[in-house]
Amino acid sequence: MPELPEVEIVTRRLRELTAGKTIIKAQLIRARLSPENSPRQFAASLKGARVEDVSRRGKHILARLSNGRTLVIHLRMTGRFFYLDRGAENTPHTHAVLWLDDGKKLLFDDQRHFGLMMVARTAELGRVKYLSKLAPEPFSPEFSPEYLHDTFKRSSQQIKLALLDQTKVVGLGNIYASEALHRAKINPRLPAQRLSKPRVDLLRKEILAVLGEAIANDNQFDAEAGDLDSSYGRYDHVARVYEREGRPCPVCGAPIRRITQGARSTYYCPKCQRR
Ligand SMILES: [Zn+2]
């Protein structure tokens, strides 16, 4: 499942490929992909609009259009974009198509059907339910040591679960939450409010470091395949514990352990992350 770094890389690629271009036609093939818009509304509100900019908020991609609307996209589990010649065949799970004025079409392919899109008025984006409650962006000044300290002080959640809660910290999923906790030597089960201020500061620093390293792992875009998903590197490039159960911790050599928290796997080092 793409987390902040992967969504950031797809966002940058979409910006490179579509900013300044006009959508000459749009089609919503699977209506449930955009439950707030009918297929007819979806097509009508995108047709003729120029893409002004593409940005990211949490794990959402925001394509701001010249007609006062923004296309909000969440890749969820398996959503991915393909940028192909207009005459190319659709991929097997194409759920939406945007035809651009550069002779290309942008496909949204989603094998597992969890992806979401929504065409919203740009002026009303702040009220969109997916966006309104999100925590500050990790790389913004609002994501300060004080912010994180205050947020965790009020939370009795286990720290791993608090990191996955997008109203507290945005962009982290199962992979980077496990990695940040390992780097900061914090036990994933520790209640968030029991973290001391220096440990919260260290955790914040390690969140930024692991996200930054993963974003830097940006592969060359393969224009021929047109698959924007392939432009991000695999997380194993930065992973020290994720999906490494039983293998030695790269810091101390103890076998990595897997536990279940909130119905999802957490990987951690029982020695480095004892407390
Ligand atoms: Zn260790």
Image (cartoon, rainbow, N blue to C red):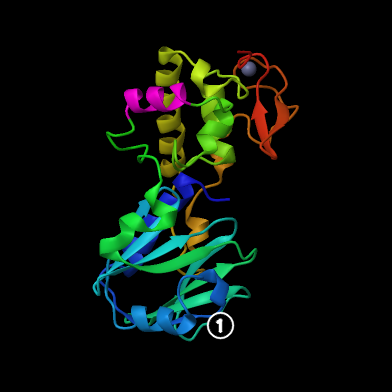
Q: What residue type is labelled 1?
A: Glu
- Is residue 208 in sight in this rendering? yes
Residue 228 or residue 178, whichever sits in front: 178
Q: Where is residue 70 in the image (x, y as percent from the top left)?
A: 33, 66
What residue is shown with label 1?
89
For disc 1, the neighbor class at 10 Å (few under 14, some 14 to 19, many from 20) is: few
Using residue 44 as the reference point, say whether residue 19 is left or right of it: left
Q: Quadrant of the C terminus?
A: top right
- Taking the spot 51% from the left edge, 28% from the top edge, the residue there is 180
Residue 239 higher or lower than 16, as above or below: above
> Is 44 in the magenta?
no
**Location of residue 113 (image quadrant):** bottom right
Residue 53 visible, this orientation: no
Residue at left 35%, top 57%? Answer: 127
The secondary structure that dominates the magenta segment is helix
Residue stretch in magenta: 144-154
Picture quarter containing residue 201? top left
Q: Which quadrant contains ligand 1?
A: top right
Picture residue at 61% right of the left edge, 73% below the top: 93
